[in-house]
Image: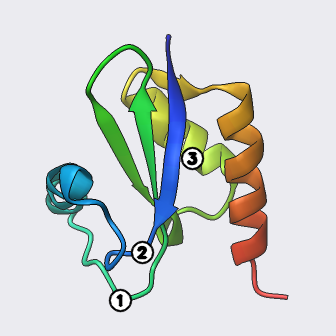
Amino acid sequence: MDQAHLVGVYTPEEIPDELEGFVKYQAAHDGHQMKKGERIAVLNVVGTSSYIPLFLSDLCCYEDLEVKLSQQGVQADQVSKVSLQRVLQEMVPQ
């Protein structure tokens, strides 16, 4: 399975121009309506110019994220895994 590395976590307003097409495509593919201020993780498939956007509000835990990535034939590298787990934990209402 290929490795994916976290590029960043953005809101729709912050997405870099070069990643916008990937995010819009994934939103259309998933039937996801982007909301102002929501968090979107973007991962790069290592060694390629492919990016995988993940709408974090659609995930309840890191295991859901792993399932989404495995459907794309990738897994997060160790550094990205730790970062994404922390981001998802911060999103859980206290």
Q: Position of residue 16 (x, y in %)?
A: 29, 60
Please state if 49 lies on the left or on the right of 59 as rendered: left
Task: Name the one closer to the observer, 10 or 72.
Answer: 10
| Residues at discs 1 and 3 in contact (Cβ within 8 Å) | no
Nearest to viewer (mark 1 / mark 3): 1
Q: Earlier in the sequence, mark 2 or mark 1?
A: 2
Image point (29%, 78%), residue name: 34
| Outermost residue to the right | 94
Disc on the earlier residue, 1 or 3? 1
Q: Which image quadrant: the C terminus?
A: bottom right
- The answer to whether residue 75 is left or right of residue 80 is left
Marks 3 and 2 in Cβ contact (< 8 Å): no
The dot on residue 65 is: 3
Label 2: few (<14), some (14–19) or many (≥20) C-alpha neighbours in 10 Å: some
Q: Which mark is residue 16?
A: none
- Res. 62 visible in picture: yes
Q: Quadrant of residue 66?
A: top right
User: Observer-nearest residue: 4 or 29?
Assistant: 4
**Answer yes or no: do the residues labelled 2 and 1 have beta carbons within 8 Å?**
yes
Type of the residue with mark 3: Leu
The residue to which callout 1 is attached is 36
Q: Is residue 68 left or right of residue 51?
A: right
**Point 25% across, 78% down: residue:** 33
Q: Which residue is mark 2?
A: 11
Name the residue type under label 2: Thr
Q: For the residue carrying disc 1, how many other residues have a C-alpha within 10 Å: few (<14), some (14-19), or many (20+)? A: few
In what element is the residue under mark 3? helix
Q: CA distance from mark 3 to mark 2?
A: 18 Å
Q: Say which amino acid is labelled 1.
A: Lys
Image coordinates for residue 14, horizontal then vertical, percent: 36, 73
